[in-house]
Amino acid sequence: MAQPLMTVQQHILEEQRRRAPQASGEFSWLLSGITLATKIIADRVRRAGLADILGSAGQQNVQGEVVQKLDVLANQALLHCLGVRGNVAIMASEENAEPIVVARDRAHGKHVVVFDPLDGSSNIDVNVSVGTIFSILRCEPDPTGTRDPMKDVLQPGANQVAAGYVVYGSSTMFVYTAGNGVNGFTLDPQIGAYVISHPNIRMPRQGSIYSVNEANADSFPEGYRRYLAHLRSGAAGRTYSSRYIGSLVADFHRTLLKGGVFLYPPTKTHPQGKLRLMYEANPIAFLAEEAGGLATDGARRIRDIQPTSLHQRTPLVVGSPAEMELLESVVSSQ
Ligand code: AHG
Ligand code: MN
Ligand code: MN
């Protein structure tokens, strides 16, 4: 082997040893719950078309199991893998109306994990990339179970201790930050491990792609329309192309590696924006900032927003410093 194999588990443990030698290793144990769940999800995603065919007769597959939608399966995988870790106090998912308290971990649980189990689910049926997004916050253990779990969940993105995503694309990649830069790992299907492939990811200072659902453009606030016209005009010193997948994870993954900007502004049908603050915008914003980019709701830094509900929506603009500075100057110029 030309280079030593560095798995995500090794990487997390080594980073911990370097930065917090007194750490208990609990955190890497928690993250390994997430990587395990995403391997299960990756396997289901890879067989999605097949499961559908096999399940078409009476909604049962060959094993006689009821075929379930992938976002339900993905949610179950995460709830199961995280719920037995021993240090997760609360789990909050896009697929569950309320946060779930892990009763057996009441005395020890110090972490809140918030996640979007399957992002971009409308792309499943057409074999286009989907993802999983997660955000990790800390909380005090609550041995007597007297605290309101919602209070522990509703923390601003600035409090995140780690965040990341998995993109189930042409390969499966795990990208995460624990506040010391962003690292990317590719799932090696031969050995079933995430192996480092993109160490210390930095977002380019400027890109040449903007990513937005342009079909909504007529109902964007005026500032956003001006901004997009400015990018198209060449005044930003670049000729821009547009790319829009419709899976936030995949659209952001491209933005992280190539630079440029992704935006989901307020629209007529979604006046508060469409994306969810706690399990879409916050983790993406943390990753973007750790890679040298920026993320706002058009006015405020995403990570400064105090959430008031678990499923609250927000406009999101995230990208390279050059495009983000331009947004600010174009929006404030009139
Ligand atoms: P989810 O599949 O988790 O509900 O997420 C949906 C998303 C997000 O991935 C994407 O950026 C956005 O919805 C796309 O929305 P439009 O189809 O309105 O462009
Ligand atoms: Mn989503
Ligand atoms: Mn989802």
Image (cartoon, rainbow, N blue to C red):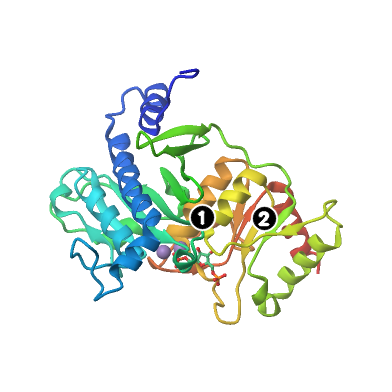
Name the N-terminal-most of marks 2 and 1. Answer: 1
Q: Is residue 16 above or below residue 77?
A: above
Q: Let me know if residue 270 appears in the view.
A: yes
Mark 1 neighbour density, 10 Å: few (under 14) some (14–19) many (20 or more):
many
The C terminus - image quarter: bottom right
The N terminus - image quarter: top left
The residue closer to the viewer here, 314 or 211, is 211
Direction from residue 50 to residue 291 in the image, left or right: right
Q: Which mark is residue 137?
A: none
Q: Quadrant of residue 146?
A: bottom left
Q: Quadrant of residue 57?
A: bottom left
Check contact, mark 2 vs mark 1: CB within 8 A: no
Element marked by disc 2: strand
Q: Is residue 256 above or below residue 117?
A: above
Q: Is residue 248 above or below residue 189?
A: below
Q: Residue at x 77, y 59 (%)?
A: 329
The alpha-carbon separation of the residues under discs 2 and 1 comes to 13 Å
Q: Residue at x 50, y 58 (%)?
A: 281
Residue that badge 2 annotates = 261
Residue that badge 1 annotates = 249
x and y, in percent, of residue 62 in the image = 22, 62
Direction from residue 172 to residue 108 in the image, left or right: left
x and y, in percent, of residue 245 in the image = 58, 62
Element marked by disc 1: helix
Q: Residue at x 50, y 51 (%)?
A: 169
The residue closer to the viewer here, 90 or 305, is 90
x and y, in percent, of residue 238 in the image = 82, 52
**Mark 2 CB lies closer than 8 A to ligand 1:** no
Q: Is residue 3 above or below residue 294?
A: above
The amino acid type found where label 1 is placed reads Val
